[in-house]
Structures are given as C-alpha cells and as structure tokens.
Amino acid sequence: MAKKQFKSESKRLLDLMINSIYTHKEIFLREIISNASDAIDKLCFISLTDDNVGMDRSDFKITIKPDKENRTLTITDNGIGMDKEDLENNLGTIASSGSYKFKQEHEEKQDDIDIIGQFGVGFYSAFMVAKKITVNTKKYGCDTGYCWQSSGADGYTIKEIEKDAPGTEIILELKDNTDDENYDEFLEQYRIQGLIKKYSDYIRYSIMMDVTKTRVKEDTKDSDKPEYEEYTETETLNSMVPIWHRRKKDVTQEEYNNFYREKFMAVDKPIRTIVTSVEGVVTYKALLFIPSKAPYDYYTKEYKKGLQLYSSGVLIMENCEELLPEHFRFVKGVVDTDDLSLNISREMLQHDRHLLTIAQNIEKKIKNELTAMLKDDRENYEKFFAEFGRQLKYGVVSDYGMHKEELQDLIMFYSSTEKKLVTLSEYVDRMKEDQKFIYYATGENAAAIDTLPQTELLHSKGYEILYCTEDVDEFTLQTLMQYKDKKFCSATNDDLGIDNDEVKEDEQDSDALLTFVKETLGDKVSEVTASKKLVSHPVCLTAKGGISFEMEKYFNAVQPGSGMKAQRVLELNLSHPAVKAMKSLIETDIEKAKKYADILYCQALLIAGLPLENPSEYTDLICSIM
C-alpha cells in the first residue's frame, strides 16, 4: 500500500501545527472531541429529514477508551463518518475543514446549524502527543469503511476496512516518555476526566468512558474490617447543558451559588448574580458573579482577571481579559457566543468588533447591577465596597480619568458628620447653601483625621468632611476635580473659602514675626503665613502647589529616594499663647525665639504625619526649653 503525501508543504506546515500553533499539549483532546461533536451534528441534522438514520438525539455519543498496556487512547463517535474522498480532502490536506464547508453550504440555504470546527487543523494537534494516528471510519449511506494512518509529516495511507456502523474511531498511539514529558498522563482516568470538565463539559452529546471505582465487598459490609474491590462503570463525563443555557426561572439561586463555588473555587457565595442573554447584531449568553470576598491574591500581580469564554460549549479561553475593564476585574463568570473570530488554534481571539461589543455590554450590565445594589441593598453594597471599593477608585484614576464619569457615583467615603460611608451625591445633597467646596481631609484613619488642626474650622462651621484613609483616595478626588459643579477642596488648602470670625489677628508687627520665622527655618518651608483656619491650635502645615503631603508620603513609600516633596507652608495662629510668647521673645531672647520657631515647625511636621529630619535634635531642643 503506497504512502501518500499531504497536499501541502506537509512537513513544514505540520511542524507548525505541532510546535507553534498550540500552547498546551492537553488541547488535543478538546480538538478531537470538538471534531467528533461536529460529525454528530452533521448526522443529527440529516436525521431531521431522513428517517433512515434511525437515531434520535439521545442515541448519539462520544466514547473515550484509554489502554495503558498498549499506550493508546481511542476516541469514538457515531456521527456522519467519512468516505475515501473526505479522508483525502480533510485529513490529507492540512488546514482543509469539512465542517467549515458543511456550514457554508447550509448557510447558503439559510439553515441554522452550529458547527465548532472551521479551520481543519485541530485534528493535527493530536501529533503533539501521538507518534502514530489511526482513523477507522465509515460514512453514513456508504457500504465501505476506510482506515487512514499516519506517523506525521512523512505522509499517510488509506485502505478499505470492514466497519458495521457509521462513525469514526481515532486511535492515538502515544509518544514515548522523556525526561521532560510524561505522555502516560493522558491515559490516566482522572486526567481525562479533568480535561473533559475543563474544555468539553458543555459538548451537547454524552462523552462516555469506563471508569474504575472502588466499593466495599458485599459479604464484608457488616464486618469490623471491610474489604474493598474494584469495579468498572460507564460514566458520562460531561454536563452537556450549561447552566447559563437554562431559563433563569428554572434555576435556583442555590444552583447558581454551587456553580460559582465549583467553577471558581470560591468558599463564599457571590454577593450578586447577573444572568444575561442577548440576540441581535451580536448574540451571546453571560453568567456573571460579583464576589462577596476578595481573593487572597487579588491586589497582586499573580491575580488573573477575565471571564471564561466558550464557543458552542467549548472552552476557548480560561481568562479572557478583553471582556472585562480593569475597574471591574473582580467579576467572575462565563460568556458563551458563536459570533467571534477565533484564531487558528482556538486558544486566542482575533480582536474584532463583536468582542468589543460584548465587552461594552457586559461593562454596562455590571455598572447597572452595582448601581441597583447601592440603591436597593445598601448593606450588601457597603460589604462589597469594603472588599472592592479600592478597585473602583483605581478605576477613576487609571487611564487619565477616562472612566471617572462612569464610576463617580459608585465610590464612597467616610463622612465626618454621618459617621459612615456616603456617596458623593449624598454629600452634595446635604451641602449648606453658602458652602463653596466639597471638603476632604487625608490621614491614616478617621480618628487621626478628627484631631487634625486643619479640620478644626470646618468642624466648627458644621461642614461635612470626606475622610480619605486609603492611599488612592486623594488621587481619586484630584482626578475627579469636581462633582455636580462643586470642586473638591482639601482641608490643608491655604484657602478654604471660609471667613474665620473667631481668629483675631494681631496685625501690629505680624509681618515682622512671619519674616523672622521664615528666616529662622530657611529652606525648610517655602512660606510662613498667618492662618485663617486655626482656632485653638498654634500651628499647622499646608501644601503649596500640585503635590500634597499624602502624595509625598505615597511616592516616597513606593519609590524610596525619589525626592518627591511637597512645598511646605507653615501657618501660625497669631492669637495662640505659644505664638505670642515667641513673638515677645524676639525682643528679649532671640535665640530662644528661634528654638520656639524650630519646635513649632517640628510639631507641624508631626501633626501632618511627616517624618522629622532629626528626632534626636528635636528632643534635645525640647529639653533645652524645659
């Protein structure tokens, strides 16, 4: 029997199939099962108009048989099968797809048929694990069966065989194990079960395999030392009908919760479940979950965002990042669609308008769900925000504020007056008539911010303050710049837009005092001013320019030695006894007055949460005054 050559630059192209197109060897089983499903689809479609098929949908199946002794893996289907011409055209010509041609023919007739394989290369992925492939097949309506055999790029043979029923049997003779590769793993039943569950769980037809199990021997069940025996049972490995294909009213929340826990290895149930089905320019189904707890690695580089992407029940991508924007990266779920342009290996997507449309729709769906939860289920929303609120704030800041309009109504901050988390909308609705700004203050926690001298005037006037306790908070508000035409104003700004009637400045010689303190401190401060915000405290620091103290601390923490430094403005409460004492000392004891100036500056640093340049020198200074 003469060996035939592939109808292409076979060795070069087949090497490409095996070594370049597919990332993981395990993909081969997905590809062969997808081809088997397509073959069954074709015969199932014919059976709708041909009573001679003699089978209904429940009769079709795919069978897997591992043989450890002979190191073979056999995949069998009772689909349409192939004749000699099909073998020549489909298996003899790499990258020729019979499924694709079948689909094209019926699309021209406007028949609605769903076929997975469209590239004609999936079959050849088996050469990643097999040194020899045998295909025994018989086409429906034909009397003769055929055997196709190949050991790779050197070509193939075809001969006639006896075969009782239509369908195809593919026998993979596995490669020998090496130090780097263990091909025997694909003969282990747990490995096969895992691959079916991962890639082919939602193939429409039963995928069957004889599974070895263990049970207690009948005659030792009541014994103190029961004995066990192995037995074999034919088991269906796949679920067939995805939960997202079932009608929402037919699925309980507990079923959704169990699917979420099993699929995404979660412990807790999701805080929200989103089910959506879209038909139109692009058709897809999606089942999305908003987790109740952040994974332990969520804010690390190891965390992988993205939704599981299926096409015709076959897993295409484990984490399709393109389907989720970064600010909603916490969402888990699956998307199933046939309207995608897959690349040749079906492991990756071509970037097309369908993918973009799905992603945009999903983003809107998530945003609407979060908005509804904020409005109708505040308690759960606050629990969600405690886990993922920082992510939403990062979303406001990222991409130069591109998403701020979408996210600004979802973020929350702790309120000085409400003593709980509030939205920006709630804050603005409560603003006093004469209030010019949305005020905020930064600090490690609410208790620390409460005692800041800079917030004293705002508190005394009854103005609500948003407390920024996370490193991203101030960046978030500065990115927003304003909300509903109200600008944001930090409590450390030199101008709060408020007249302080309680502060009575001693105008006489105040310029001389401010000049003295500036000359004493030198380059440590850029300016010394009479405070308009201090009431009972003697001193505070405010930042001048675009960099705040919190930004300075953040940048120096993530990049030590960066030299990032805010311009310091020292504000003095001219009515405070300590400042008055310093002023009087200028005339009587200039050196002591300088010590007062240094002490007040160090105290202002401590209040602002900034490090002292020389703590030992500060303590010595205090001791010298004492």
Image (tube, helix red, strand yellow):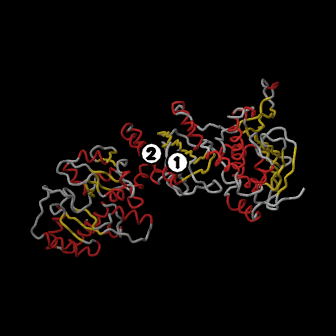
Residue 174: x %, y % from top left? 80, 53
* Mark 2 nearby-residue class (10 Å; few <14, some 14–19, many ≥20): some
Q: CA distance from mark 2 to mark 1?
A: 19 Å
* Residue in the image at 48% along x and 42% along y: 292
Residue 40: x %, y % from top left? 71, 41
* Residue in the image at 60% along x and 50% along y: 318
Compared to residue 270, the image places residue 626 above or below, namely below
* Mark 1 nearby-residue class (10 Å; few <14, some 14–19, many ≥20): some
Q: What is the number of the mark on residue 366?
A: 2
Q: What is the number of the mark on residue 295?
A: 1
Residue 257 figure quarter? top right
Residue 615: x %, y % from top left? 35, 67
Report whether 226 appears left or right of 436: right
Badge 2 marks a residue whose secondary structure is: helix
Q: Which residue extends farthest front? A: 109
Residue 232 figure quarter? top right
Label 1 is placed on what type of residue? Pro
Q: Split into 4 quadrants, where in the image is the N terminus?
A: bottom right
Q: Split into 4 quadrants, where in the image is the C terminus?
A: bottom left
Label 2 is placed on what type of residue? Ile
Compared to residue 60, the image places residue 391 above or below, namely below
Discs 2/1, front: 2
